[in-house]
Image (cartoon, rainbow, N blue to C red):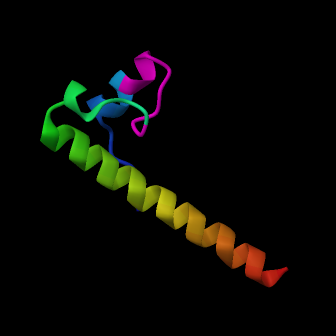
Amino acid sequence: HPMVKSTAIADAGLTKQTLYEVERQQFTRGTYDRAIEALDLVNGEIESLIKQVWKRN
């Protein structure tokens, strides 16, 4: 899954936080929800790849 470019992620980075750490109320609902959905998909894919490698060992 590709990661989207998001102002929510950029704005969270200004405070040296991840999007998971900031308050949802700091952003418009749609912007925040799209960014979280993309992060969850990308992170889920990474987690799946790690688990696949672990099963091989």
In the rendered image, residue 14, in percent from the top left (x then y), is placed at 42, 16
Reply yes or no: does residue 33 show up in magenta. no
**In the displayed structure image, the side of residue 48 where residue 5 appears, left or right:** left
Instruction: Identify which residue is drawn at 47% across, 26% down.
Output: 17
Quadrant holding the N terminus? bottom left
- Picture quadrant of residue 6: top left
Let me know if residue 2 appears in the view. no
**In the displayed structure image, the side of residue 31 where residue 37 appears, left or right:** right
Helix, strand or loop: magenta stretch: loop
Q: Is residue 22 above or below residue 32?
A: above
**In the displayed structure image, the side of residue 26 where residue 30 appears, left or right:** left
Reply yes or no: does residue 17 show up in magenta. yes
Let me know if residue 55 appears in the view. yes
The residue sitting at the bottom extreme is 56
Q: In this view, does 25 lie above or below 38?
A: above
Quadrant holding the C terminus? bottom right
In the rendered image, residue 31, in percent from the top left (x then y), is placed at 19, 39
In the rendered image, residue 28, in percent from the top left (x then y), is placed at 14, 33
In the rendered image, residue 2, in percent from the top left (x then y), is placed at 40, 56
**In the displayed structure image, the side of residue 47 where residue 40 appears, left or right:** left
Q: What stretch is highlighted in magenta?
A: 12-20
The residue sitting at the top extreme is 14
Instruction: Identify which residue is drawn at 40% across, 56% down.
Output: 40
Instruction: Identify which residue is drawn at 34% across, 22% down.
Output: 11
